[in-house]
């Protein structure tokens, strides 16, 4: 019986996660944890495996579901139209498509996407360019787990402001 109730609750949440967005239906991949809270999903796009692992472990320990991509192209493939991701942590310097180009494509697909740019090669010019392209935040690597958690939390809290401006296409988290 408990399993049946849990299955019914997941189905109800999934049904409630359909939102109308610009004339098309989007479905948010809605997973839940104990207590009925929605699990927020963060996509990490970074070419350095060790950095992805540390970020993944930090975010998972904070309760986030995490996806990983090792370059801009595979990041865009996983990102899709953005409906299943609550935030993206995006490295700037990667082989092939760099972070700014990846950010440009993400913003084209979902103007309300919350993208945190991360780089060890920070400059004011790069930060300004990233913000102009729609980045929510810009952090310098290496970053502490606390800085990472705070950047993700801040990016996720900006959904309300974006929604008020009428640009968001996501369901409430």
Image (spheres, rainbow, N blue to C red):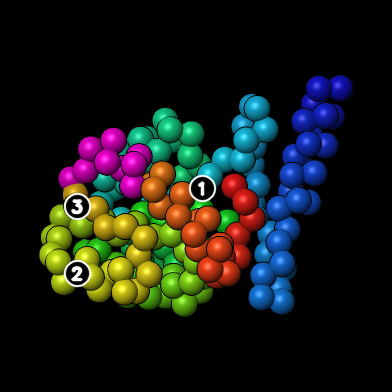
Q: Name the residue under label 3.
A: 140
Task: Please tell me whether mark 1 or mark 2 is closer to you in this view.
Answer: 2
Label 2, residues with CA under 10 Å away: few <14, some 14-19, many ≥20? some
The residue indicated by pointer 2 is 126
| Magenta stretch, residue numbers | 142-151
- Name the magenta segment's main secondary structure: helix
Q: Position of residue 112 (x, y in %)?
A: 50, 66
Q: Please, what secondary structure does the residue beneath circle 1 have?
A: strand
Residue drawn at point x = 48 percent, y = 34 percent: 63
* Nearer to the camera, 53 or 61: 61
For residue 140, side relative to residue 87 (left or right): left
Label annotation for residue 41: 1
Q: Mark 3 or mark 2, which is nearer the start of the sequence? A: 2
Label 3: element kind: strand
Q: Is 154 a magenta residue? A: no
Q: Are marks 2 and 3 in contact (CB under 8 Å)?
A: no
Identify the residue shown where x is 76% and y is 51%.
16
Rate crowding at label 3 as few (under 14), some (14 to 19) or many (20 or more) other CA atoms within 10 Å: some
Q: Can residue 119 be seen in this view?
A: yes
* Residue at screen point 71% across, 61% down: 19
Alpha carbon separation for disc pair 2 and 3: 11 Å
Q: Is residue 45 visible?
A: no
Q: Position of residue 13 (x, y in %)?
A: 74, 44
The image position of residue 106, as x and y in percent, is 44, 70
For the N terminus, the image quarter is: top right
Residue 64: assigned label: none
Q: Is mark 2 on a helix, strand or loop?
A: helix
Q: Which badge, 3 or 1, comes first in the chain's sequence?
A: 1
Asked if residue 56 lies left or right of residue 50, the reply is right
Instruction: Say which label, 1 or 2, has the lower sequence index.
Output: 1
Q: In which quarter of the image is residue 146?
A: top left
């Amino acid at each position: 019986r408990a399993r049946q109730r849990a299955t019914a609750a997941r189905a109800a949440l999934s049904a409630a996660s359909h939102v109308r967005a610009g004339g098309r239906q989007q479905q948010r991949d809605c997973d839940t944890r104990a207590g009925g809270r929605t699990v927020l999903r963060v996509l990490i796009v970074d070419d350095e495996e060790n950095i992805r692992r540390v970020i993944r472990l930090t975010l998972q320990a904070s309760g986030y579901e995490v996806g990983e991509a090792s370059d801009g192209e595979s990041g865009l493939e996983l990102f899709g139209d953005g409906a299943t991701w609550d935030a993206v942590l995006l490295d700037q310097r990667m082989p092939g498509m760099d972070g700014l180009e990846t950010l440009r494509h993400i913003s084209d697909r979902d103007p309300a996407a919350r993208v945190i740019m991360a780089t060890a090669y920070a400059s004011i010019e790069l930060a300004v360019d990233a913000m102009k392209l729609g980045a929510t935040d810009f952090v310098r690597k290496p970053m502490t787990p606390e800085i990472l958690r705070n950047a993700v939390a801040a990016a996720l809290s900006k959904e309300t402001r974006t929604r008020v401006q009428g640009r968001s296409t996501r369901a409430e988290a």
